[in-house]
Amino acid sequence: MAGRVDGKVALVTGGASGLGAESARRLAREGAKVMLTDLAADAGQAVADEILDAGGTAAFLTQDVTDEARWGEVVAATLDRFGGIDVLVNSAGVGDGGQSILEATLEAWRRIVSINLDGTFLGVKTVAPIMVAAGRGSIINLSSILGKVGLPGASAYCASKGGVLMLTKSVALELAPLGVRVNSVHPGFIETPMVVNAFRRSENENEMRDTIISRHAMARLGVPREIADAIVFLASDESSFMTGSEMVVDGGYTAA
Ligand SMILES: NC(=O)c1ccc[n+]([C@@H]2O[C@H](COP(=O)([O-])OP(=O)(O)OC[C@H]3O[C@@H](n4cnc5c(N)ncnc54)[C@H](O)[C@@H]3O)[C@@H](O)[C@H]2O)c1
């Protein structure tokens, strides 16, 4: 039976952990050749090995998404290895340390915006010409519900994710006539190392977990598979009439 993204080549940043890792696994299971990248080399290579062991096609490269020159090398290596890039998933990202604006520092702000927003911009900018030349492609940017609604203590994160939302829409308008689709995904709180570590760092881990859970109408956290499935859909031709959309997958967090 043909996979949903059979024969496509997907480049997935943040592929060593959480949503990037699960997206890479599911894209590979649906027939894509996957290039994973991340700062975390051992963990990233382990995800690629897992995909290979399961009979899929994958490779891993170390990458800091804030480094423009490295983006050029990663794209060249992906073309060399797999012959094209049909799908880009910009999943590399960092959370906020929970800093009030009254204590915020420019240094912390710049770090978050540089990874979450500049990193996504560089990915789109470097990969778009390849997709435009091929006349097809799907770019999927990980924003967040926190790119649509605020959270106290997360101003830099929210600003970076709101930036990803509007970057996505602008580029979608530019690239639609050229055959390239660009969409953002807005997860609620999903059980990944990013979220679990944020709970651990809080003063009362269980209380924070319960508070966050209570904000989702479905009264639970999401699991990575639930976001990866949305990403496979956006990567596949099933979503051929979608561009510039905000795909919210949040258990009802923003419905209220
Ligand atoms: N988990 C959630 O609830 C949630 C909700 C909304 C949006 N998101 C977004 O989804 C994306 C993935 O989050 P996750 O939950 O899987 O987090 P995660 O921490 O599990 O994974 C993020 C990965 O990004 C990598 N990374 C960090 N900085 C990098 C850099 N400069 N260059 C390359 N790689 C880098 C990390 O090494 C890590 O492997 C992020 O953009 C995040 O903001 C997550």
Image: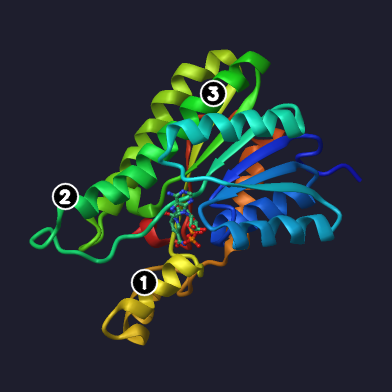
Determine whether the residue tagged by mark 2 lies in a helix, strand or loop.
helix
Q: Is residue 244 visible?
A: no
Q: Nearer the viewer, residue 52 or 246?
A: 52
**Quick check: 68 left or right of 79?**
left
Of circles 2 and 1, the one toward us is: 2
* Residue 5 percent coordinates (x, y): 76, 39
Task: Give the distance between the C-alpha atoms of the residues marked 3 and 1, in whole angstroms.
Answer: 33 Å
Residue 137 lies in what quarter of the image?
top right
Tell me which numbered mark, 3 or 1, is placed earlier along the sequence: 3
Q: Position of residue 240 (x, y in %)?
A: 65, 29
Q: Which residue is mark 2?
A: 106
Task: Judge by depth and name the residue closer to the eye, 136 or 99.
Answer: 99
Image quadrant in which the C terminus is located: bottom left
Residue displayed at 81% across by 35% down: 7
At 38% across and 31% down in the image, what residue appears?
167
Residue pointed to by mark 3: 128
